[in-house]
Amino acid sequence: MSYDRNFNNTLAIWTAFGGRGSIVLPIPTLSWSKKYYNNFGYTQYGSERQINVYDNGNAQIAVYYAKTPYMSYWNKTTKQWTVVSVPWWSHGQPEILYAADGVFIAKIVGLANIIASFDGITWHNAGYCAGAQNAMTCGAYDMDRGSGVVSWWYYKSPVYYSFDSLEERTAWTLVGSDGTSVPIFKYLTRHKGYFVGVVGGDKSIARASTSYPGSWSTTIPEDVNDTRYMFIRSINNVLFVMKFNYTNVGGTYTYYVKLCVLNDDATEITETNLSWTGDLANNNIPNPRNIIWMPDWGKFALLKESSLCVSNDGLTWECLYQPGFTTSQYDTFDGAMHIPGDGLYAKASGYVYYAPY
């Protein structure tokens, strides 16, 4: 889990594997190695080394965080990472806002354009947000209804939406310009006919129908325990979120983190058996961004510090030690995927862990 620049928290660490019942299937012990930007076909641009991996369910990409007009995608025919020209990225660094349901939604850092792709090869200017200010923070898309949303970190322009084709550059519609009727979001996902997100400030969760993305309601309100939420994701029809509280004793912060599952309308939250006590920026945390659906297993997999965890339902997990799958504090895992016939990938800082499988 990468340190989020909107958080200023620092801390310390330890965890135990969750789930001590019967193993849901033989969990493989894999051979992990590091891949860098050059392993994905990129040449270095300045001092930048950051590489990120994303899977939209149909296509996989490795995104080099630099102002260079290329994109690397997994070529299913050659079984190799292949770089293609994408002139959009010559205008600024690419940042993927949403990868699921057969679509990638991206932004060019510092600009108000929304860039989209279905295959990671051809990228379209899917629209723009007139009058938006500050930074575009997150987005989501419903392929069934052809609707998308993006949120901005500014109270006068929190959410824009569109029902237009992602291949056309049209103006997305602003809602909530009064600063109160529509929340700002830190994280967004699409789940069974809803857009669901963690509201800026991290203390509540809200949703909107993907048919009516201009009307939002709070489903999990702020509570007396000062509970916070991060990294909401819908994976194979299960809605995951990270929940945490913290204490501050003499300037020492301790975080109490739980991996949780929300029900389908995002009104109820259930804790899983995976938890963590310690630093918020640590690989032992069961981060929803590192959950993968494994179709061949018919199960969920989760990557965390020295561990591969497996679950039938997303609630009860079993974990197996993975030698060599570890990195230092603050150099943390923040995104994972599996390419059938190739292997598992997990993003760290400046490189990607890879294991053939």
Image (cartoon, grey):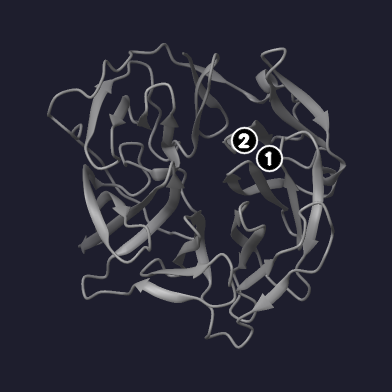
| 76, 308: nearer the viewer | 76
* Label of residue 146 in the image: none
Could you tell me residue 178's position as x and y percent?
Answer: 60, 88
Q: Earlier in the sequence, mark 2 or mark 1?
A: 2
Residue 29 in sight from this viewpoint: yes
Residue 347 in sight from this viewpoint: no
Could you tell me residue 218's position as x and y percent?
Answer: 40, 75
In which quadrant of the rendered view does residue 224 lie?
bottom left
In which quadrant of the rendered view does residue 111 lie?
bottom right
Q: Residues within 10 Å of mark 1 (few under 14, many from 20)?
A: many
Residue in view at x 45 percent, y 50 percent: 233
Image quarter (top left, top right, bottom left or bottom right) of the N terminus: top left
Amino acid type of the residue tagged 1 in the rendering: Tyr
Could you tell me residue 287's position as x and y percent?
Answer: 37, 43
**103 versus 182 height, above or below:** above
Could you tell me residue 11's position as x and y percent?
Answer: 31, 49
Relative placement, left or right, of 75 versus 8 is right
**309 versus 258 height, above or below:** above
Relative placement, left or right, of 320 versus 290 is left
Q: Residues within 10 Å of mark 2 (few under 14, many from 20)?
A: some
Q: How many marks?
A: 2
Q: Are marks 2 and 1 in contact (CB under 8 Å)?
A: yes
Amino acid type of the residue tagged 2 in the rendering: Gln
Label 1: state its secondary structure.
loop
Residue in view at x 53 percent, y 72 percent: 184
CA separation in Å, label 2 and label 1: 6 Å
Residue that carries the numbered disc 2 in the rendered image: 50
Residue that carries the numbered disc 1 in the rendered image: 65
